[in-house]
Amino acid sequence: MQVQRQHTINGVSYFEAGEGEPLVLIHGVGMRVEAWAPQIALFAKTHRVIAVDMPGHGESPKLPTGSKLEDFVAWFGRFLDELNIDAANVAGHSMGALISGGAAATFGRRIRRVAYLNGVYRRNPEAKAAVMSRAAAIRANGVDRDGPLKRWFGDDDNSLSARDLTRGWLGMVDPEGYAIAYCAFAGGDDTYADRWRDVRCPALFLTGSDDPNSTPEMATQMAAITQNGWARIVDGHRHMVNLTAPHTVNRLLAEWLEHREEEPR
């Protein structure tokens, strides 16, 4: 997918297409706006779709070393301000899910709906230790391109092209920007975990049945405590489910975009 990026006054890069109610897409660590290609292609027909490069990714400037998840959420709020967006639907994947969840928890009605794709929630001690170890290794050794591919993809035919694309994006990422974002990701699974009870907008929690890190159990736990939340699990897929099962994910996102706040779970 070839995209013509635009830039805000503060240099944040994004791609925009379509008209209508805003739908903002936030990718995960190591990725870029192109990772949303299947969703942009469909939803630009019905919405104003804005895919943003996370700090230190694509063409967006990085945040300072030591930035935490709260700093990425504040960055996202400034991005909405720069585009004069008063209210938006927000879908985030992985680290982008953590940002979208923080926005839903703190921005009030500015977030009309939130979709939390392959996002983490209260990792167990073993998973916490593993992700913190990976964060430390990135600081010492740089970007690991093989480890994520092994965790994120299976060996099925649906994963082959998505894996190749993802390998290319990981090869393009700024190492320092990647490290800053990954450290925030590693420490961010508890940051807004207690706030889902306060979220009132429609909230979709979606992951793959075989995602070893953003597990189905995490999705169902978050949905259970969110007033207007529900979980959807895509069978047979792992972490990059929006690329490996785009038709299923697009159908579930389309259903999410039809939900209203007063609708029951």
Image (cartoon, helix red, strand yellow):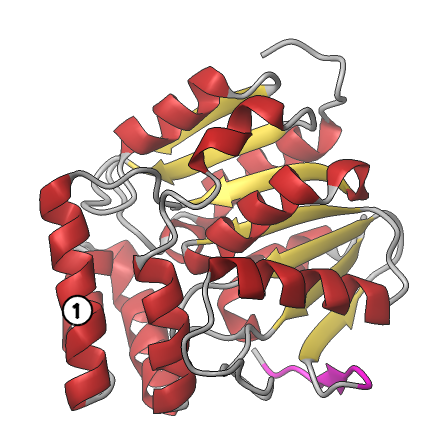
Viewer-proximal residue, 34 or 121?
121
Viewer-proximal residue, 101 or 42?
101
- 103 above or below 223? below
**Can residue 222 be found in the magenta stretch?**
no
Q: Name, please, the residue furthest toward the front.
A: 66
Q: Position of residue 153 (x, y in %)?
A: 22, 58
Q: Is residue 153 visible?
A: no
Q: What range is drawn magenta here?
A: 2-9
Q: Where is residue 105 in the image (x, y as percent from the top left)?
A: 62, 38
Q: Is residue 166 left or right of residue 137?
A: right
Q: Can residue 9 be seen in this view?
A: yes
Chief SS of the magenta region? loop
Q: Residue at x 61, y 25 (%)?
A: 198
Res 77 quadrant in image = bottom right
- 253 above or below 35? above
Q: Quadrant of the C terminus?
A: top right
Res 240 quadrant in image = bottom left
- Please state the total of marks drawn on the protein image: 1
Q: What residue type is labelled 1?
A: Arg
Q: Which residue is drawn at 73% across and 52% down?
A: 23
Secondary element type, mark 1? helix
Q: Name, please, the residue furthest toward the left.
A: 126
Q: Name the residue under label 1.
A: 134
Q: Quadrant of the N terminus?
A: bottom right
Q: Position of residue 163 (x, y in %)?
A: 28, 69
Q: Is residue 218 left or right of residue 72?
A: left
Q: Residue at x 43, y 46 (%)?
A: 191
The residue carrying pointer 1 sits among few (fewer than 14), some (14 to 19) or many (20 or more) residues within 10 Å by Cα, namely some
Q: Where is residue 230 in the image (x, y as percent from the top left)?
A: 51, 21
Q: Which residue is drawn at 29% across and 79% down?
A: 167
